[in-house]
Amino acid sequence: RKFDAANKAIDRGMKAAPQNIGLWETKAKLAVVEKGDVSVSEQAFESAKSMPLTAEGKIKVAGARADVFLLERKYQEGLNAAESLSDDLLSTVPVAICGKYYLIGLARRGLHDEAGARVAFLKAKEFGEEELKKSPDSPDLRVLQAKILAYLGEKDSALAEAKRATDLLPESKDAFGGPDITAGVAEVECILGENDRAIELLDGLLSRPSNITVPLLKLSPAWDPLRQDPKFQAMLEKHGVKT
């Protein structure tokens, strides 16, 4: 993982185009993956306020804002950010409306509102099913739907969607996007309580190029169910120096 080279390349690009939201997005993601650092994301959100953004760009920034709140475990702020997004506006961007209710579900779970979370996940499932009719070969949508189904306790359906996502974009076919799908499948296994399988997948991702790193695993609430598992702790220790 050549973070130094990547950061230098991004910094060069930002000197030439300081208001390029795509470069800010990449820089923020690198900081989270490399160091578990969300401060660059905060800088990006502040900079975005003065950028001329398209409607889709505004949606991406707003969604990312909610995502980062959840990473920070600021669940009420994340909930407010997600709920502030208009369904009508999101309907113009595939997957976005499904993602909104998924984020609401996560935020409500973080706030220990299980009933509210279930309502949100059911809405996300409904929107996901509609989107899948239009884009049945979208691995990203398939793996998102798998997570939603897992949170709803629909284990068999969740695993089936996860397998479809992997079949659509295996790592052997795409060395960049494939590992992201594998990470999503690991999250599905984690949600379902299949700790050993989740850890096995994560261990593999830590052993080859991917966006899964020890700092990210330590930061993200997605992996909280694994925190007390000795195998998870051993995996973090094994890869900690290298990652």
Image (tube, grey):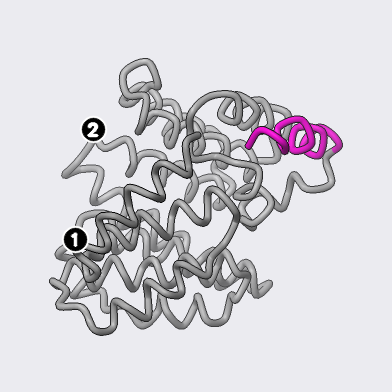
The amino acid at mark 2 is Asp
Q: Position of residue 54 (x, y in %)?
A: 13, 71
Q: Which of 125 and 75 is in front in this view?
A: 75
Identified at 30% across, 48% down, the residue is 129
- In three-dimensional space, the C-alpha distance between marks 1 and 2, rounded to whole angstroms, equals 17 Å
Identified at 52% across, 70% down, the residue is 39
Q: Neighbour class for label 1 at 10 Å: few (<14), some, many (≥20)?
A: few
Q: Residue 93 carries which label?
A: 1
Q: Quarter-wise, where is residue 26 in the image?
A: bottom left
Residue at the far top in the pictured view: 172
Residue 110 in sight in this render? yes
Q: Neighbour class for label 2 at 10 Å: few (<14), some, many (≥20)?
A: some
Element class at badge 1: loop
Image side of residue 10 versus residue 213, left or right:
left
Identified at 37% across, 15% down, the residue is 172
In this figure, which residue is indicated by the disc labeled 2?
A: 137
Q: Nearer the viewer, residue 233 or 52?
A: 52
Q: Position of residue 177 (x, y in %)?
A: 35, 33
Is residue 237 part of the magenta span, yes or no? yes
Residue interval drawn in magenta: 230-243
Q: Nearer the viewer, residue 100 or 1?
A: 1
Count of picture labels: 2
Is residue 130 part of the magenta span, yes or no? no
Q: Position of residue 30 (x, y in %)?
A: 45, 51
Magenta segment, prevailing SS (helix, strand or loop)? helix
Of labels 1 and 2, earlier in sequence is: 1
Q: Position of residue 210 (x, y in %)?
A: 48, 33
Element class at badge 2: loop
The amino acid at mark 1 is Val
